[in-house]
Image (tube, rainbow, N blue to C red):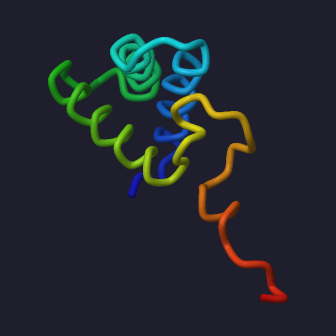
Amino acid sequence: MATDGIMEEVATAYRARRALGEPDQPAWEAALVAFKRCRPELPEDEARSRVAELIFEASEVYGPWLYGAEGCHVPWWHHTAPSPSE
């Protein structure tokens, strides 16, 4: 899983477009721009491949938030974990 902060940048850019009701492609392009700001040295094809991987990872970490759902910017399991009293 990505741990270098780039996933958060990519996920935030992707989510911003999806929250506006835009489909995947414009959101993906915004994520690519965010990724390139973080890693401008990578070739275009490698950047595109990495963004696809990061969005997949982000979908597993952030769940519905990534696609524009309202709520906290925390991993989905923080919302679904049983309370300590359970």
Indicate whether 45 appears above or below 86.
above
Would residue 41 appear left or right of 85 to someone viewing this image?
A: left
For the C terminus, give its image quadrant.
bottom right
Q: Outermost residue toward the front?
A: 86
Pick the front one: 58 or 36: 58
Q: Outermost residue toward the right?
A: 85
Would residue 10 appear left or right of 65 to someone viewing this image?
A: left
Residue 73: which quarter of the image? Answer: top right
Would residue 58 appear left or right of 72 to someone viewing this image?
A: left
The residue positioned 37% from the left and 28% from the top of the image is: 39
For the N terminus, give its image quadrant.
bottom left
- Residue 55: percent from the left, percent from the top? 38, 38
Count of picture labels: 0
The residue positioned 15% from the left and 23% from the top of the image is: 45
Residue 28: which quarter of the image? Answer: top left
- Residue 71: percent from the left, percent from the top? 74, 41
Indicate whether 12 appears above or below 23.
below
- Residue 19: percent from the left, percent from the top? 60, 20
- Residue 3: percent from the left, percent from the top? 47, 54
Pick the front one: 73 or 71: 71
The residue positioned 45% from the left and 28% from the top of the image is: 38
Q: Outermost residue toward the left?
A: 45
